[in-house]
Amino acid sequence: MKASIYLGNKSFSTTNSQPRTPEANEVRLDIAYCGICGTDIHIYQGHMDQRVKTPHIIGHELSATIAEVGKEVKGFNAGDVVTIRPLQPGPSVPSDKGYSHISSNLRVIGVDLPGGMQSSLTVPADILHRIPDQLSLRHGAMIEPLAVACHDVRLADVKAGEVVVVIGGGPIGLLIALVARVKGAKVILSEINSYRLQLAANLGFETVNPAEGDLTAMIRNLTGEYLADVVFEVSGARSAVEIMTTVANKRGRIVIVAIHPKPQPVDLLQIFLSELKILGVRVYEAEDFEEAISLAANGQIPLDEMISGVAALEDLQSIFENIESSPQGMKYLIDVAKS
Amino acid sequence: MKASIYLGNKSFSTTNSQPRTPEANEVRLDIAYCGICGTDIHIYQGHMDQRVKTPHIIGHELSATIAEVGKEVKGFNAGDVVTIRPLQPGPSVPSDKGYSHISSNLRVIGVDLPGGMQSSLTVPADILHRIPDQLSLRHGAMIEPLAVACHDVRLADVKAGEVVVVIGGGPIGLLIALVARVKGAKVILSEINSYRLQLAANLGFETVNPAEGDLTAMIRNLTGEYLADVVFEVSGARSAVEIMTTVANKRGRIVIVAIHPKPQPVDLLQIFLSELKILGVRVYEAEDFEEAISLAANGQIPLDEMISGVAALEDLQSIFENIESSPQGMKYLIDVAKS
């Protein structure tokens, strides 16, 4: 029973996990796998020091087996394999309008609350999603980022036959591309990292490298002057914000998936002229988890191809150092059960 | 038969109008009234010199009587009272996706083509909209800006009971407020000009002056912490772009009606966090004219209260000088028929 503790200053230390007996409507989980997310990298790099109080246990992409069930829990039993929707909405305020997944008092397990980089975690039962038998525990830990992609594609209302440009080919960008393709869209992925470009190409996507020319001209060329019905901004780059309004065609939708900590110059004239929509999309709702599980269980998303490595909990420090020094990977999983 | 010619450099000159016999599918109009629009003021101030070729006849908000009907025109006869939807889409391109009102080759009568500040104008019959008997010719000249407001409110999907904040209380802002109120929305109008604030208050709107404090705090206070479901940015001010993302509540819609010639810093983080939508909206489609005519004919929009003055074509120069020196007015009409 171990836990990896984030101490701040890019430093992790492995210690004992402290199992907690579930109260009513809670379950205690034995964590199987826990994925490393871009948010975890932000935490590691200190960008979220104001929000994340150390010592802290990160990790919000997990698969687990239920070890113990508290009173009043219905529909789940010890031994069930699950993932969690790691959101705790907190008290609602009027401006939330009932959207609990983006509520003003939202706390995220693994960010604001202890997460999955430990052997044992006790959570409310209402955030559980069952992992069906067809799905491995490894793939179960990838349902959370896949649910992000399902949410983004759903809110963008991507339709069959539409042209979709994904700017940024990291794990979320690639998953968005994969989900959009399942919806029947023609997807073009824009990325500057050659490793990620190759991986996207291997998965059958048309790719462009905006470092090699004008992205709008490339998309214009690839689409016969049609341009993009939907642009997903997943890169976080200022240059992407500059160009996203010209990559979109008339009444195109531009979906802001990436975090832009500072206000960015946006071409509001182009938004006006072309009647564009910009959509902010954040995390997911329960239905997105259900869709992600369904897509993964049906084999519609090649999750294995996205796994760059699987390591032990004790290796978390070196994995982060590796990610930071050479961004050649895609998704790293921690085999928590093995630790 | 007169015409007011814009010569450039804030200068108008009155000359003779040159009637043109309608070709097939065209009608020749005797112009009754022609309104002065914000776009006309932009032309006068030289902001559109690159687009507007002088000498030019401005004017795109008009009422008219059909003087002569060309061959193959169906459904309209000499003597009919009409307004025009002053858009000429031009050849379509793939990225237009059939949205002719925002097409890449769009030309606007009164901006790119000769407009209504003259006694006689010949136009295609497919841009005519009939003005019913209940509507005066003066009100007929206000259908075009009312159609802008109908388009904006329609694309924003304003629903009964929603809180709408309109930033900017000029003619378009006020018409948006009026149309949103017809839809059952609770409307708050934000404006810094005391004349326009008073006019909005006289029309029964709650008003706020963002020069007197923090707009978000004022809206928070007026709505019991609910904030705005829909924000219309009609001011063109950079400060409005800065604050529009905090005035909106979760999943709120922000509608860009104003022209912002240069990219403006937009808080994309707030758009992400609150899952906001930014919608560009431009001009109108045929159905917006039909709705505008219906609302005006049913007396649901107090158009008389918006008319600041009616002048002759020869007075165009002095009207523009007056508008520029003291922005105390709302909508000025030119009585072209009288000229």
Image (spheres, coloured by chain):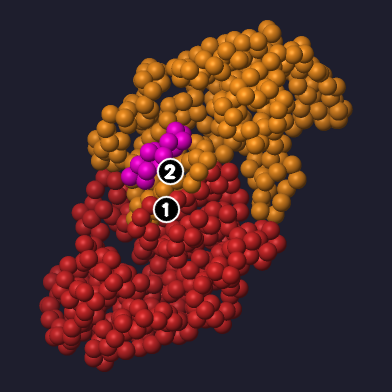
Chain colours: A orange, B red
Residue A110 percent location from the top left of the image: 67, 27
Q: Output the chain of dot 1.
A: B
- Label number found at residue B264: 1
- Residue at image position (63%, 19%) is A11
CA separation, marks 1 and 2? 17 Å
Quadrant in which residue B142 is drawn: bottom left
Q: Can residue A285 be seen in the rendering of this structure? A: yes
Considering the image in quadrants, where does the N terminus of chain B appear?
Answer: bottom left
- Residue at image position (79%, 21%) is A28
Quadrant in which residue B282 is drawn: bottom left
- Label number found at residue A319: none
Considering every residue shown, the one lying at the far bottom of the view is B338
Q: Is residue A238 magenta?
A: yes
Q: Which residue is mark 2?
A: A254
- Amino acid type of disc 2? Ile
Q: Are marks 1 and 2 on the same chain?
A: no
- Amino acid type of disc 1? Gln
Considering the image in quadrants, where does the C terminus of chain B appear?
Answer: bottom left
Considering every residue shown, the one lying at the far top of the view is A338
Q: Output the chain of dot 2.
A: A
Residue B42 percent location from the top left of the image: 31, 69
Considering every residue shown, the one lying at the far front of the view is A9
Looking at the rendering, the stretch of residues picked out in magenta corresponds to: A230-246
Q: Nearer the viewer, residue A171 or A302?
A: A171
Query: Which of labels 1 and 2 is toward the front?
Result: 1
Q: Can residue A84 be seen in the rendering of this structure? A: no
Question: Is disc 1 surrounded by few (<14), some (14 to 19) or many (20+) residues within 10 Å?
Answer: some
- Residue at image position (26%, 65%) is B48
